[in-house]
């Protein structure tokens, strides 16, 4: 969360640093585009993705190991689908968890659900880390391929975002604060008039 105001600036000036700290999609694409024009190393783009993308994954695995179904219910938003999944996991074992951990970066929902399931299903930490690394490198490789193919065009976009991004971020923060202040004033007036 602390990086949010700095993301627009870093994506066009220091994408590898942003990638290392945050592991975001845009930073990997921008880093590979910078590699295409000779301002970065493609190997460094892939290596920086590892800690950036995997930094919290072992914690989710560990939470699954400690709290199992309760943690699955928490991260799945207590949805019926999440609870059904939690009940099926013990029967599926490796046939589900191993490919799920590898493919977690590609799924359209938070991978933390899969990491919690892997911990709860009894996957060893070393196995989890290896499978997670494979999936992370596959995802980072796909994004890096996109950035490398775009080359200078992606660099130009990233630099434009950096140029205007800080001001846009500040404007959005100001709008959010103004909206919150206005809502609080209305609530106070409503309470004062009816109270």
Image (spheres, rainbow, N blue to C red):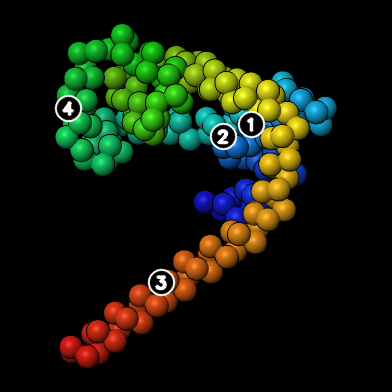
Which residue bears the numbered disc 1?
A: 29
Position of 66 with respect to 145 (left or right) is: left
Which residue bears the numbered disc 4?
A: 84
Callout 3–callout 2 Cβ contact below 8 Å: no
Q: Circle 1: is it few (<14), some (14-19), or many (20+) Cα within 10 Å?
A: many
Mark 3 → mark 1, Cα distance in angstroms: 35 Å
Q: Circle 2: is it few (<14), some (14-19), or many (20+) Cα within 10 Å?
A: some
Q: Earlier in the sequence, mark 4 or mark 1?
A: 1
Q: Earlier in the sequence, mark 3 or mark 2?
A: 2
Q: Earlier in the sequence, mark 4 or mark 2?
A: 2
Q: Earlier in the sequence, mark 3 or mark 1?
A: 1
Callout 2–callout 1 Cβ contact below 8 Å: yes
- What is the x, y in percent for residue 99? 39, 13
Q: Residue at x 52, y 51 (%)?
A: 1
Mark 4 → mark 2, Cα distance in angstroms: 31 Å
| 18 w.r.t. 188: above or below | above
Callout 4–callout 2 Cβ contact below 8 Å: no
- What is the x, y in percent for residue 45? 69, 27
Residue at the limit of the structure toward the right, as seen here: 38
Which of the 4 image quarters holds residue 28? top right
Which disc is residue 180 wearing?
A: 3
In front of the other: label 4 or label 2?
2
- What is the x, y in percent for residue 190? 25, 84
Please tell me whether mark 1 sits on a helix, a strand or a loop: helix
Please tell me whether mark 4 sits on a helix, a strand or a loop: helix
Position of 185 with respect to 78 (left or right) is: right
Mark 3 → mark 2, Cα distance in angstroms: 30 Å
Work out whether residue 102 can be spotted: yes
| 164 w.r.t. 138: above or below | below
Which residue bears the numbered disc 2?
A: 25
Q: Circle 3: is it few (<14), some (14-19), or many (20+) Cα within 10 Å?
A: few
């Amino acid at each position: 969360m602390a990086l949010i105001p700095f993301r627009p600036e870093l994506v066009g000036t220091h994408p590898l640093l942003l990638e290392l700290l945050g592991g975001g999609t845009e930073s990997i694409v921008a880093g590979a585009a910078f590699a295409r024009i000779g301002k970065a190393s493609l190997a460094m783009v892939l290596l920086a993705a590892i800690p950036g993308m995997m930094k919290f994954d072992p914690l989710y695995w560990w939470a699954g190991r400690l709290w199992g179904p309760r943690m699955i219910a928490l991260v799945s938003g207590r949805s019926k689908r999440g609870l059904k999944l939690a009940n099926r996991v013990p029967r599926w074992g490796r046939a589900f968890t191993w490919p799920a951990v590898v493919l977690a970066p590609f799924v359209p929902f938070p991978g933390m659900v899969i990491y919690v399931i892997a911990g709860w299903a009894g996957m060893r930490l070393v196995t989890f880390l290896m499978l997670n690394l494979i999936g992370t490198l596959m995802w980072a490789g796909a994004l890096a391929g996109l950035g490398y193919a775009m080359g200078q065009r992606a660099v130009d976009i990233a630099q434009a975002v950096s140029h205007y991004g800080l001001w846009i971020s500040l404007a959005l923060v100001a709008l959010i604060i103004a909206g919150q202040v206005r809502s609080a004033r209305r609530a106070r007036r409503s309470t004062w008039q009816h109270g």
